[in-house]
Amino acid sequence: MISKPLPEYASFAYAGTMTHNQYRAALKKLGLSQRKAAPWLGIALRTSQAYALGESPIPEPVARLMRLVINLKLPLDEAAKLMTEKK
């Protein structure tokens, strides 16, 4: 069976953790800067920068959220609405 290589951002799609390089690739795929990602993820700008620089590990919930939005091809505004919707 011939398989196509995964795009760079998809290399973390099946892993439980995310490296700083994968975080930066995910930001790029989502069209987010570190500054714009911070409020969307509910974190401080400095935390987003620390993830991107490899100074802090990316928590599993952050990695899962980013993978989910990328893999489902959800628009960011729709994902934000789902995250803040009250039942």
Image (tube, rainbow, N blue to C red):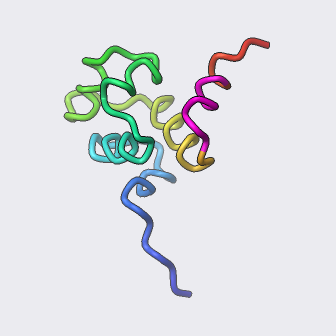
- The spot of residue 23 in percent (x, y) is 34, 40
Return the residue nearer the eye: 68 or 1: 68
For the point 40% across and 53% down, the residue is 9
For the point 38% across and 35% down, the residue is 32
Q: What main secondary structure does the magenta stretch of the protein show?
A: helix
- The spot of residue 72 in percent (x, y) is 62, 47
Name of the residue lying farthest toward the bottom:
1
Q: Is residue 60 left or right of residue 35?
A: right
Q: Is-magenta flag for residue 79?
A: yes
- The spot of residue 50 in percent (x, y) is 23, 26
Q: Which residues are magenta?
A: 74-81
- Image quadrant for the C terminus? top right
Q: Is-magenta flag for residue 77?
A: yes
* Occupied quadrant, residue 77: top right
- The spot of residue 22 in percent (x, y) is 34, 46
For the point 52% across and 37% down, the residue is 64
